Structures are given as structure tokens and as C-alpha cells.
Amino acid sequence: MELFLQQLINGIVQGSIYALIALGYTMVYGVLRLINFAHGDVFMLGAFIGFYTANLLGISQPSVGALILVMTVSMAGSAAVGLVIERFAYRPVRKFSRLTSLITAIGVSLLLEYAAQFVFGATPKSFPTIFETQNISLFGNVTISNDSILIIIVSIFLMVMLNLIVFKTKLGKAMRAVSFNLDVAKLMGINTDFIIAFTFALGSALAAAAGILYSVHFTKIDPLMGLLIGLKAFVAAVLGGIGNITGAVLGGLLLGIAEIMVSGYISSSYKDVFAFLILILVLIVKPAGLLGSAAQEKV
């Protein structure tokens, strides 16, 4: 029982990171019907922006304030990267077929990965200690680290804030209108280019937050770290129902828990295989995802 509870805690922590990244996938897909495969690499850039920010500021005393400062700079920098990607990579090909946009997304992903290797170097780096970590005993042999608690709290806060933006503001109403029908939204006077750019910036900021939380927890970062994690977050988005915000959160948590359970009870060698097995099963059994709804589209 103690092993199960420990694995459950670890799975929720892992799933919270997947959920933050999956939200970016699901928002962009909801607005543009585009799978932004470069999103995982924005997660990586967020981690590196945080790395160089912490070193540039010379943070020597780990604290919550230092973490908030580094995360804020990283989210702002990644949001700017998201705006640049949308403006110069995706907007010019938006009028073409979705296949063109998909190929562009793959190209942007490869560009970010190899540009990061050229600029940052291929050698993994140790993330600076901006938050002091320690284990807290719950009961028996079950423990949780304070950085794990931080990941859960920050993830919940950001998800709640996103929900408020999307469902309680005029900007969120415009996002939902563009998601429902782009052409009709234009006729209603909505600046669709601005809304799409804002969606990219918001999703990129969430990915950067996930990058900082991941780096604080696991400490090692490298230019290819976003490849596998980004794909798993995409699996989480599909599992929950891509285009559905609540579904992205649910999918991330379920995938994180399932992955850690497989590692604990079977073997860590199979956790990656299991993640993509889930994707295949979901596409076969319920292509729309757990909370998604099937919709017919004109071709």
C-alpha cells in the first residue's frame, strides 16, 4: 500500500508537468486545428532561459522569490518565442493545407532543437539551485519533496488562471469564437490574427513554466529534452480530448500516473512504450479522447 501511495504521488507530480505542456497543444489545436510539434521545444527553451537567467542574476540564495523571478522571465521569453514562431512560421502557411502547416511545425521543431545544440552545446547542464529541496515524511515510508508540492501547487494555480482567462474574460470569449468558426469570428469584427498570436504566447508561457518546474525537480537539462516529453504531452492531450482544456489536464495526470505505475511495478524500461501504447489504444477505441466529442468536418 505504501508503494502504491508513493507511486501515486510521483505520478501526480509527473502528470502535472505533462498537463501544463498539453494545455499548449490543446489550445493551439482548438483555435487553428494545428498540431504544434515545436511546442515541446519551447518547453526546452523555457528551461534554458531560466538556466541563463539564474546564472546572469547570480542567484546564490535559493528561495521562492528567486523561483518566481526566474519563472516569470522564462515565461515572458518563451511567450515572445511563441509569437515569433506564429508570425514568421505558421501565419504565412495558414492559407494552405493542414499538411503544409504540419510539415512546417516539424521543421520548426528540428530548427529549434539543432539551433539550441549549436547555441547552448549538446552537453547536459545542471540547473542552478534556485529552490532548496527537502523530503517531507508523510507516514511510514511515504515521502514527498517540497519541490513536488511546489509543482502541484503552481500547476493548479496556472490551470485555474488559464480557465479564468478562457471562460471569464472577453479575450477568452474571442478565443472560443475563433475556435468555433474562424471565418465567422472575422465577420464579427474579431482580430483573429491577434487572438491566434495570443494563444501561441499563452501556451508557450505555460510550457516555459513546466520547463522551470521540471528543471528544479530533475536538475538536468539538454537541447533535446523537449522531444520525448513534448510527444508524451501530445499523447496526454489526445488522451483527454485534444481541443478540450479540462481533457488536457485529465490526460496529463492519467498519463503521468500510468507511466510511474509501470515504472514501479513492471520496469522503467517500458514506461515510454506504455505511453505510446496508450495513444494507439485511444485512437482505436475513442479517437476523440476521454472528454472530446467527435465532429464531422467538410473535406
Image (cartoon, rainbow, N blue to C red):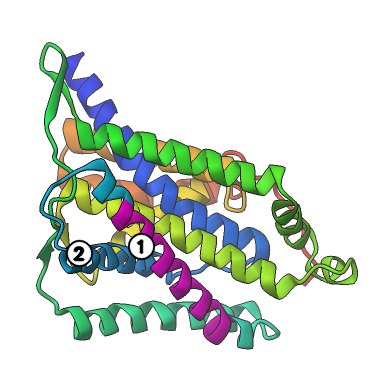
**Residue 201, relative to residue 291: is it above or below?**
below
Left or right for 179, reference 291: right
What's the amino acid at mark 1?
Val
Q: Residue at x 30, y 61 (%)?
A: 228
Relative depth, front residue between 8 and 89: 89
Picture coordinates of residue 224, whole percent (x, y): 24, 70
Left or right for 292, reference 265: right
Which is more N-terminal, label 1 or label 2? 2
Q: Nearer the viewer, mark 2 or mark 1?
A: 2
Left or right for 90, reference 176: left
Relative depth, front residue between 159 and 3: 159
What's the amino acid at mark 2?
Leu
The span shown in magenta is: 69-90
Label 2 sits on residue = 57
Q: Quadrant of residue 212?
A: bottom left
User: Do we see residue 297 in this rendering?
Assistant: yes
Q: Residue at x 48, y 77 (%)?
A: 105
Image quarter where the N terminus lies is: top left
Label 1 sits on residue = 73
Relative depth, front residue between 235 and 91: 91
Q: Secondary structure at mark 2?
A: helix
Picture coordinates of residue 36, whole percent (x, y): 50, 69
Q: Residue at x 22, y 37 (%)?
A: 147
